[in-house]
Amino acid sequence: MSRPKHHFLIITLLFTAVISCLQGCKSKDSQAEAIRIRWAHDPETLDPMQQPNPAAFDANNLLALSLLQVDAPKHAYAPALAESLPSVQLVGDSLMRLNYRIRPAATWDDGRPVQARDVEFSLKLMFCPGLPNENIRNHYRFVQAVLADPKSPQHFTMVCQGQAPEYVHASGDFFVQSEAAIDPQGELRRYSLAELQRRAAAAPADSGLQAVAHRYLAMGTTAPGAWPGCGPYQLTQWKKDRYLRFRRKAKWWADQLQPVPFVLRAQPKQLDFAIIPDAATATLALRSGELDVYPHIPAREFARLRTSTAARAELRFYTALSHDVVTAGFNTRRPVLADALTRQALSRCFDAAALLRATQLGDGQRTVGIISPSDRINYNDSLPLIPFDLKAAAGLLRQAGWRRTTGPAGGWYRPGPRTTQQHLQLRVRYRTSEEIYATVALQFRAAAAELGIPVLLQPTEAGAFSQALQEGDFDVYVRMLKGNPFVFNFIPILHTLGVGAGNATGHSSPVADRLIEAIAKADSDSRRAQLLRRFQALMQQEAPLVPLFFLPTRVAAGRGLTGLHVNSLKPGYTAATIERATNTPLP
Amino acid sequence: MARLGSASHPWPHRAACGWLALVALAALLAGVLPLPYLPGVPDLAHVAQPPGTASGHWLGTDPQGRDVLSVLVFGARTAVLLTLPAAVLSALLGALAGGAAGFWGNKARLPVPYWLLAASGAWWALRLPMPGVALALAAGGLGVAALARLQQRAFPTWPVPINAVVMGTATTLDTIPRLILVVAVAAGAGLSSGALLGLLTLTAWPHPARLVRAQMLRTRELPFVEAAHAAGLPAFRVWFRHALPHASQPLRTAMPLSVAGLLGLESTLSFLGVGLSPEVASWGRLLGTVREEPTAWWLFFLPGICLTFTIISLIQLSRRPSVSA
Amino acid sequence: MSWLVLWRLARTGLAVWALASGVFLLSHHDLGVAARLAAPDAADLPLSGGAPTTAAQQQATILAIRQRLGAGLPLFYVSRPPAAHPRQWHWNGRRNQYHRWATALLHGNLGTSFRTGRAVTAQLGQALALTLPLTGTAAVLAVLAAIFLARRLAAGPWWQRPVRAALAALHALPLFLVALVLLLLLANPEALDWFPAYGFDQALEADSGFWTRVTTYALHLALPVTALVITALPELTLQLDAALRHELRTDYATTARAKGLAEKAVIRHHAFRNALLPTLTQVAELLPALVAGAVVVEVVFALPGMGSLLATAAAARDYPVLVGGVLLTGTARLLALLLADLLYFWADPRIRWHA
């Protein structure tokens, strides 16, 4: 029996193997043409109608195209599949016709031209039963019909219900899918768009529709690259939760265009997305050259890299102000929070400046309202920022009728309706996923404790959080509001119509409602800016929400890369325009 | 030889006791100690400060601006108030369940009237259809009891498979790895301290139950138990007063280990971000913050040392009786 | 003997089925949360304008998602309709979610994931393919190292005391601590940059040679495996060591020594086999853990294995994946029990005589 010797042998062998390949395996990826980008999560599904997370959004942007897409440097919608922005024609006082023309050069992978019927088909898919399209269909109910021009298959007219200006952009902002690939038998053609929209959930199953749904679902789960696209890239490898590899199509239709518009540029020959959930691990990978681009890098990692000389020699750092604002909201349905004075008092308990400094380390910006300070036209810069001032808060509370008592059951009390006593105590809900909400909540709790207001923190997991918000099971919430510079429609979050759905604060006042409606209908930019400034002032007065600060977008990337176009829009940079400067040696 | 070992090396044992006493003291006095900062109050002007800077945070701050010293002290309280009760409760539950399973096996018999009454109660509680059946069952139970009384006979009995039930439940619970089970429940519900205590207890009891059951199988054959039976004592009394204390002896050594395991589990949960809410200080969460700030050695070493020392001390404590035995 | 094994198997099989059914029924009892997670956050500003989402529309959306996830059917064979007739039970027949799930399961179909729409079996298979090499290597290395160390320790060399103390100290370290230390020490450009920091084989190119692939793979696995071995080793070694020392104090060992055998020979030929029994149970207990993956290590080293799959499925309410994982670990446990019985049979001939 010589087993111990065997062990020695195995261990020695392993050791030598490890040591010997340390150098060999650290040799960097030889493919200079690949750009490697970090994702925190797997995209999970590439179904263009779902996009459950930012990664799926990125991936779909590489594989598919919309009629209109956002031109990041210009901060505006630009035509992608469409030849130009649609021409608008108002009909009566409730209809709108949008005339589109698809670029004649645009083709699918199999060489077929992209046509009006593909656009109609994509809209019909949103209402096809049996598909995960419940969310997207809510956004496209306003499209009533797609009228194809019988003379030219690339030309069509979209008939929209309603005349809101944002419909012009929205009408082109969905991915166009190939009818020939998904529905070769033309099953969906048997129905008009309006028929599918009206179709009841309980309607008897239709074998044709089922076949389309089945085919569509199967397409998402088969080999990578099965999804038929007209975008510049093809998915060649998808190792679940590990990496995705996109290769530039050798011959892509937009290469013939002269000049190539920004939204149709596609520089890297290959894009590799590595999925690294842990931020610190991703930083290590970036430092060791296993990654080229690290978007959405956490503040602390970013600050640490920025101060390290070694990292500064290898990396470049980009920031821009995003449209995401960290916001606290009050449940105005609660009797203790029903009056604006109390809410104003509590909004002075948030130390936004210190929170911004402590969590974002110098980036980001405080704000007076939910319009980004980077939007110079609409941001109301004449309003003061809400100060962190506990004395003023106590004063406001007294104005609101609260009286502080001392003793073991001490706190703030005021007489309620009839003979009841209201006691000011709050439950703060926030999502467990991100540390920043916890920091805000802890700071608020400490400040409130100084005033003598007991605060209970309730970190809640994502699903339960949105349920609690919708059911009004909270006093104060801390969350992120995601905005954008194109749509100024506050009806879902602050209008009476939104109560019970998106309006978690339950805020509802006739003045605000009228103002919100006027903003949504405003026909000129200057008029809208005027209304928006008034709206910000009104919101600061009523204080259903306390927008604390806008978050920055941070990107760290290798020194040799150019063309990231870090900007304030989702996803914060443009993967398809990144170039590797040829003269810089690889790290 | 073993006794020699423990006698010539009393210092590890003493050190272990000393450390544990220190932790317990910190936990007890956390509220009254003159700490410059409280654990739930972030000092946003000083985030991620190393120890010894002038800001008055003697052991530095974490990336959220919380004072490390106070988190350590209050973390000791969390550790003591959470893991100790969880270990005690799971040991109790395990001892009762495992003891019963070992003592009676599948051969315990319960008088038929009790069976019928229990069934009728369950029927009623579940609101099964036809409430008449529940009434009939209850009436049947009382009838059997009355009949037996009239005829001056013992109640007829049916067997209760205690062993199968206890061991089956334990096996079922063991089938899912503990961490996954706790994560599944904790991620869904979001936990208060009480709920976490219950959850830890629920997942930890099978181990003591197995230990006690194995010991009970031996104990019930011992002469003193047989003597108690022969003396005509009721079975329950023999089990509870005589057999169970003896059979629970392995728990004495297993207990510190169980506390250590639960402490590790609680820290791991906090590290993974499920578990306690952020105003509750926890060593594990403090350790977890090192991922946000990998260069902050003080976030890693200080709670790491506390955690490791405590677990080592507990293991040391559990070792001694087994060495001298 | 075989009857005993069969009986235990049947019992554990039943327990596994009951557990999976329980998890299925409990989780599918409230599909609302899963549906809500799939629904968009209504409190975000809409990017694409459109009509405002009203409360009714929000309800309709969630209802539609529930329908798609399968909540259109009743959950179980019997159900109690709410409110209207509180004391009435309703027989649903075979058109219910549980029946569908069970029949599909008997045909080897675990359903499709809520989140990704992919087959659960495929997802579990992929995760297993990553997890098994990791945990398997770690387990084999840990067991071999434990046997090696324990035998040496039992012979009572001069270094036994410090090594035992070191093992006890290691035993006290939680896994996440070990993993973090390894990561921050050995895969950090600011400390020692020896190992890749994450993943299995991201850097692999299709055209790289066989040996490059193998070494890359080994290099990526080195740190996670080391972390697992370091945490598993002390318990195994200390247990085996204690058992060996116990056996060495018994009469037969004394007899063997009296015959003039060297201490090493006594350990190898006499004590070892007997001391192995409790360790065998420990090893068999390891098997379900092998399949279930190591959540902590997978989180720290960004390995998309079974542990992180199940943990994220639990957090995201991806019930089909969760139920599938429970079934899988349950089956592994079944096999582990069988294995433990067989190993006992092999290691201790007395059991053979008794049976």
Image (cartoon, coloured by chain):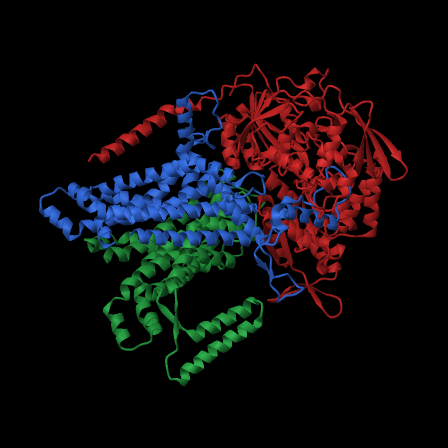
Chain colours: A red, B green, C blue
Residue C303 image offset from top left, x and y in percent: 47, 36
Find the residue positioned furthest to the left. C259
- On screen, residue A540 above or below A319: below
Residue at (29% x, 78% y) in the render: B232
Residue A482 at least partly seen: no
Image check: A427 left or right of A121?
left
Q: Where, by quadrant of the figure, is residue A134 drawn?
A: top right
Residue B293 image offset from top left, x and y in percent: 51, 38
Q: Nearer the viewer, residue C186 or A312?
A: C186
Residue C6 at least partly seen: yes
Q: Nearer the viewer, residue B255 or C354?
A: C354
* Number of dots carrying numbers: 0
- On screen, residue A315 above or below A501: above
Q: Nearer the viewer, residue A314 or A491?
A: A491
Q: Nearer the viewer, residue C219 or A569?
A: C219
Image check: C347 left or right of C175?
left
Residue at (33% x, 58% y) in the render: B211
Residue A217 image offset from top left, x and y in percent: 62, 36
Residue at (18% x, 49% y) in the render: C248
Quadrant in which the C terminus of chain B is drawn: bottom left
Residue B11 image offset from top left, x and y in percent: 28, 53
- On screen, residue B82 above or below B128: above
